[in-house]
Amino acid sequence: MSEESTGDPGPTPDGSAGRPGPGRRRARGGGRHRWLAAGGVAALATVLGLSLALRSGAAPACAAAPVGLAAPAGVALAAGRMPLAAPPTGGTVHKGKATFYDSKGAGGNCSYPSAPANRLYVALGPTEYSAGAACGGYLDVTGPRGTVRVLIMDQCPECAPGHVDLSREAFARIADPVQGIVSVSYRAAVDPPLSGPLTFRIKEGASQYWFAALVAEHGNPLRAVEVRQGSGAWRTAARQDYNYWLIDSGAGPGPYAVRVTDVYGHRVTATGVTMSPGRVQRSTVKMYGGSAPAARTAPSTRPPSPRPSATPSRTTASPSAVASATAPAPQDGTGPPALAASSVSDASRPADCASRS
């Protein structure tokens, strides 16, 4: 498995608190005792009222249900309901608006070492970003000038569902940047072409006692990542909103087998992943659409013939070639090559429903 060094793009939240500005007017000294007495009575009444409310089963005002996120134009939500947090998947066409921004070459909230080389990427609002569940998927976005395919790699905290924040380069493919904001439609790109096999990046600070890995080059959003060492049991990693998969108690010193499943049921297993923090490790398996092993010619038991035979040699189909018949069909209607031998199909849908720092 090949490796290359990268920096750590992990987000660092700012915990500083703003200080109040100067010039706040002080209360006059006169009547100070009257104000203190009145304040004490009010505080006592508040405590008594809250105690009675809790005993009677009523919820205090601070426990009111959170206000739902804004829905895109044309989408009506039932009273008191929040839109479901989930990444765009399947063939559903969404309508909304697009703006653009510049990540300055960074890989966004999905923690990729850098933005894609073609600079075609998108940030989604919290609902569609879905706590990292959308990372690594692709959208086809259509605007006044045409359609562009973009990698989901970032979160736009202020974007409501239906608002996609494109890179400047992607926006220029579908509209005049002078407009700044345009109406668009978009849908998930199912089984987009892959640029290569799966890659894994073990996070800095990881060890045999704390496992954290970033999975990339998977094409569709992921549903699950499982890890095991040797012949041990598979251990399920937990996805973080910054797109690393964690096992808090660790997975051992390695090397590991990593089983990856996407939202459409593609599943592959990569082996030989090592505990090498900060390095991108390229596996030998693709998430889907990988070429089947070359068919082997059945050996002949007859002695060589002095002249060419008119009968072609028979070939034996490999198990992976047979398994390819059950692989999900691609969007363009052309039959994909056979899946890798370690691939299996799982028709179950994503159970995960879950930030640009």
Image (tube, rainbow, N blue to C red):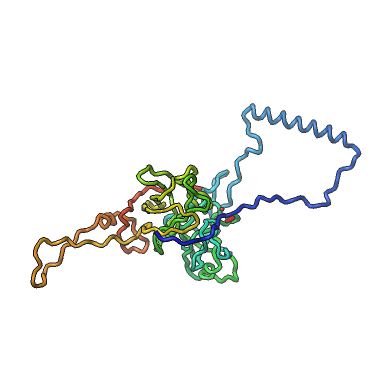
Residue 92 coordinates in the image, percent (x, y): 44, 56
- Of residue 311 and residue 159, the one placed in the foreground of this image is 311
At 50% across and 49% down in the image, what residue appears?
A: 206
At 32% across and 57% down in the image, what residue appears?
A: 339
Tell me how many marks there are. 0
- Of residue 222 and residue 148, the one placed in the foreground of this image is 222
Q: Is residue 85 above or below residue 289?
A: above
Q: Is residue 97 visible?
A: no
Judged left or right of residue 73, residue 251 is left
Residue 293 coordinates in the image, percent (x, y): 28, 60
- Of residue 334 and residue 83, the one placed in the foreground of this image is 334
In the rendered image, the residue lying farthest to the front is 253
User: Which of the 4 image quadrants contains residue 28?
Assistant: top right
Judged left or right of residue 110, residue 220 is left
Residue 310 coordinates in the image, percent (x, y): 11, 70
Q: Is residue 28 above or below residue 184?
A: above
- Of residue 290 and residue 230, the one placed in the foreground of this image is 230
Q: Quadrant of the C terminus?
A: bottom right
At 58% across and 54% down in the image, what residue appears?
A: 11
Q: Is residue 172 above or below residue 34?
A: below
Q: Is residue 177 visible?
A: yes
Residue 67 coordinates in the image, percent (x, y): 61, 45
